[in-house]
Amino acid sequence: MNKNSIFVADAHSMGEDKFYEFLCDIDSTNLQCEEIYLLGDIFELLFGGIDYIIGQNSKSVELLNKISQNIKVVYFEGNHDFNLKKLFPLIEVIKIANQPQKYIYEKKIIYIAHGDNNLDFGYKLYTAIIRNRVVLKVLNFIDVLVKNKISKKLYKTVPHKARYEEIQNFKDIVDERVFNYADDKDYIIEGHYHQDKSYDYDGFKYINMPSFKTGGYKRIQDLIKVEL
């Protein structure tokens, strides 16, 4: 991880929107960086293996692949985007089972995850089922048979879920989450909750990223304090 790293979380992109414009800026070098960390839910819906959904995001997928030829891109799968490795052959795709990942920046130890790891058993079972390649293959087969009615229904219903409101008990949620991480931590960075908040603990700091829709991207210097 270097000083020219950019972080994006929860863009919930649909077509040629703010996130697509962000990718265009990077591709044109109007926005310069050397590494991009995508913290999940970058797309409103993107499931590898579901043809219609992939097609709806084709321009951003193609542009991300183009960018990854010259810039390091790390993609943490979220609960809206998964089974992505075949879609992004040059991108380092981090499945939920492999989150968090550990990085070092200016001697600071940083753990990064989308933010839906280490939840209860019911959620883990649900995510395991929806991420299963056989399940997705069967779903795609049925979706094609019914002329993509399943995918189209998802596109109509999912975006209407309220997701940008302040979570009143968020500190309580964080208090439970942070101690699932290893002890050797200086920072924890997560997305998923869209809260744009940080909390100081004894010896480390927790940072929750804003949704890209409301808070844009962050540079590493916005997140990590380096002592001079």
Image: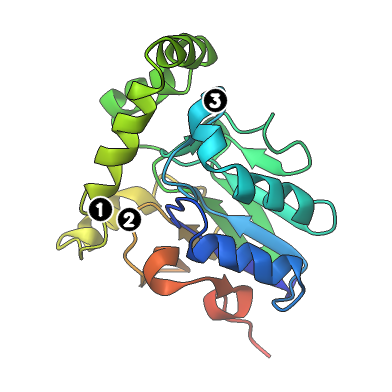
Q: Earlier in the sequence, mark 2 or mark 3?
A: 3
Residue located at (63% from left, 68% from top): 6
Q: Position of residue 187 (x, y in %)?
A: 52, 64
Tag 2–tag 1 contact (CB < 8 Å): yes
The disc label shown at residue 51, or none? 3
Question: Can residue 172 be seen?
Answer: yes
The residue labelled by disc 1 is 173
In front: mark 2 or mark 3?
3
Q: Earlier in the sequence, mark 2 or mark 1?
A: 1
In front: mark 1 or mark 3?
3
Q: Position of residue 29 (x, y in %)?
A: 77, 74
Tag 1–tag 3 contact (CB < 8 Å): no
Q: Residues within 10 Å of mark 2 (few under 14, many from 20)?
A: many
The residue furthest left is: 168
Q: Amino acid at mark 1?
A: Ile
Q: Earlier in the sequence, mark 1 or mark 3?
A: 3
- Classify the position of the C terminus by image quarter: bottom right
1 or 5: nearer the eye? 5
